[in-house]
Amino acid sequence: MSEDRYLTFALAKGRLANKTMELLEKIGITCEEMNDKDSRKLIFVNEERKLKFFLSKGPDVPTYVEYGAADIGVVGSDIIMEENRRAYEVLDLGYGKCRMCVCGPKSAKELLQHHEMIRVASKYPNIAKDYFYNKKHQTVDIIKLNGSVELGPIVELSDVIVDIVETGSTLKENGLEILEEICPLSARMIVNQVSMQMEPERIKKLIMDLKQYV
Ligand code: PRP
């Protein structure tokens, strides 16, 4: 593959992208242009290393990678599970650690034990569906929300929620608790399947270098 081809990274914007840039810096990869926090630029280039970086909403990262608009993506494993896009998952980066859980008021615990028909609110309908239908064999009504999911049981939209728990303080402050744990989560690196064939040396070297720090 031509030395002049850019390797493009799609990063989930926010804390994960900042952590990723810190990690890349440890292996000598930087992007000066990204340090200007006031900039509204969407794509950043490191000409010397022939690298491009762009920031996107988390759920769009696997989409960019599947279609080859980005060679490499960094995103939470929650989103990888939810989006179920075609890409190689090559590295657990070890940060962004949290848990996917079924949460609700203490009183809802019983509803999970008797396979009752319940309402589940979530930003992650596919993960919720897989958990309740395939693992628990419980028929549930899944309601998709786009954020502040903890509101679900509080305003009686749903009995429980399926959501990310990091410190647990959102649950605590809203009188909710973890009822069941679905799986641990962390930031992952994913690679476009064609890019892996076209640029094996460059991508494998990147993975090997990063492995020293994760
Ligand atoms: C996430 C998640 C929980 C909260 C958990 O929401 O959906 O609401 O963080 O974190 P904690 O356990 O440390 O309290 P986020 O802040 O991404 O916003 P959102 O609710 O609008 O999705």
Image (spheres, rainbow, N blue to C red):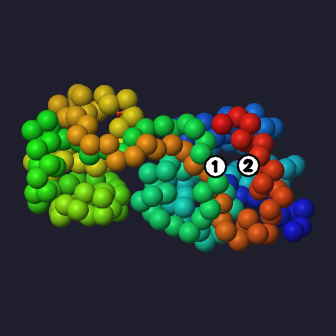
- Residue 131 in percent (x, y) is at 31, 57
Q: Secondary structure at mark 2?
A: helix
Q: Name the N-terminal-most of marks 2 and 1.
A: 1
Quadrant location of the N terminus?
A: bottom right
Q: Secondary structure at mark 1?
A: strand
Taking the image as shown, residue 109 lies to the left or right of residue 100, namely left
Tally of numbered discs: 2
User: Mark 2 is on which residue type?
Assistant: Ile
Q: What is the spatial separation of the Cα atoms under label 2 and label 1, in whole angstroms?
A: 7 Å
Q: Residue at x 42, y 59 (%)?
A: 82
User: Mark 1 is on which residue type?
Assistant: Leu
Q: Residue at x 19, y 60 (%)?
A: 138
**Residue contact between numbered discs 2 and 1, judged by CB atoms under 8 Å:** yes
Please tell me which residue lies in front, 44 or 142: 142
The extreme right residue here reads 3
- Residue 23 in percent (x, y) is at 68, 36
Q: Residue at x 77, y 46 (%)?
A: 208
- Which image quadrant is residue 132 in? bottom left
| Mark 2 residue's CB less than 8 Å from ligand 1 | no
**Residue 88 visible in the current orientation:** yes
Please tell me which residue lies in front, 111 or 63: 111
- Residue 69 in percent (x, y) is at 65, 67
Taking the image as shown, residue 173 lies to the left or right of residue 101, namely left
The disc at residue 214 is none
**Residue 35 visible in the current orientation:** no
Above-or-below relation of 31 to 64 = above
Please tell me which residue lies in front, 139 or 60: 139
* Residue for badge 1: 91
The disc at residue 207 is 2
Answer few, some or many: residues within 10 Å of disc 1's Cα (few below 14, many 20 plus, some between 14 and 19). some
Answer few, some or many: residues within 10 Å of disc 2's Cα (few below 14, many 20 plus, some between 14 and 19). some
